Image (cartoon, helix red, strand yellow):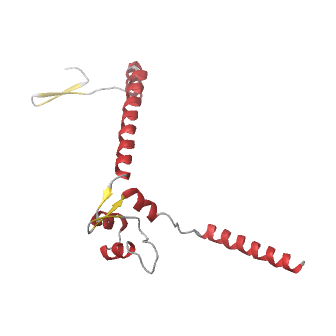
């Protein structure tokens, strides 16, 4: 047995004296021999195909028609709240866009999502900017009245 090996029972354990840096250099050289343009091209084709599939799923999902249970799940509102927001109240049109077939209500996912996001809350900075703009507008009106 050589100096790099040791006998333990029936097994022979071989000690490797390979420097880690040398091993990494060898791995890098092997990886460089792999034709990277071909791999990159394949990955690009796969990525493009996946993007097309995801786009198609998004379009299909946007046009999805939901029943009342789907609308409840999407909006987080109760059935009662949704029914209330689909009713004409004191001559006001319904708040939620919907379709009615017989006694059943239906909703388009895209329309519900648009309804949910149509009145975003202003953050503090935008709120302060709006207040400052209104104050300037009021001050300008007051100054014009005083000049008459």
> In the rendered image, which quarter is residue 146 located in?
bottom right
Judge left or right: residue 85 versus residue 117: left
| 60 is higher (above) or lower (below) than 142 | above
How many marks can you see? 0
Q: Residue at x 39, y 43 (%)?
A: 55
Q: Residue at x 34, y 26 (%)?
A: 18
Which residue of the protein is positioned furthest toward the left in this rendering? 10
Quarter of the image with the C terminus in it: bottom right
Determine if residue 129 is in view.
yes
| 7 is higher (above) or lower (below) than 55 | above
> In the rendered image, which quarter is residue 24 located in?
top left
| 102 is higher (above) or lower (below) than 6 | below
Give the camera-side residue of 30 and 107.
Answer: 107
Give residue 5's position: percent from left, percent from top.
22, 25
Judge left or right: residue 147 versus residue 25: right
Determine if residue 20 is in view.
no
Give residue 16's position: percent from left, percent from top.
29, 26
Give the camera-side residue of 24 and 41.
Answer: 41
Give residue 63's position: percent from left, percent from top.
36, 52
Q: Residue at x 66, y 70 (%)?
A: 130
Give the camera-side residue of 80 and 117.
Answer: 80
Give residue 34's position: percent from left, percent from top.
38, 20
Quarter of the image with the N terminus in it: top left
Give the camera-side residue of 135 and 35.
Answer: 135
> In the rendered image, which quarter is residue 20 located in?
top left
Q: Residue at x 41, y 25 (%)?
A: 41
């Amino acid at each position: 047995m050589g100096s790099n090996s040791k006998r333990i029972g029936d097994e022979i354990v071989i000690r490797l004296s390979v420097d880690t840096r040398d091993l990494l250099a060898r791995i890098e050289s092997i990886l460089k021999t792999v034709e990277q343009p071909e791999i990159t091209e394949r990955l690009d084709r796969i990525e493009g195909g996946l993007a097309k599939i995801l786009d198609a799923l998004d379009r299909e999902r946007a046009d999805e028609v939901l029943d009342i249970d789907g609308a409840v799940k999407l909006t987080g509102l109760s059935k009662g709240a949704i029914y209330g927001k689909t009713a004409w109240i004191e001559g006001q049109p319904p708040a939620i866009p919907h379709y009615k077939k017989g006694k059943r209500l239906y909703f388009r996912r895209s329309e519900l999502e648009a309804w949910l996001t149509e009145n975003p809350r202003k953050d503090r900075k935008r709120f302060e900017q709006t207040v400052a703009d209104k104050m300037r507008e009021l001050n300008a009106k007051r100054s014009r009245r005083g000049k008459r």
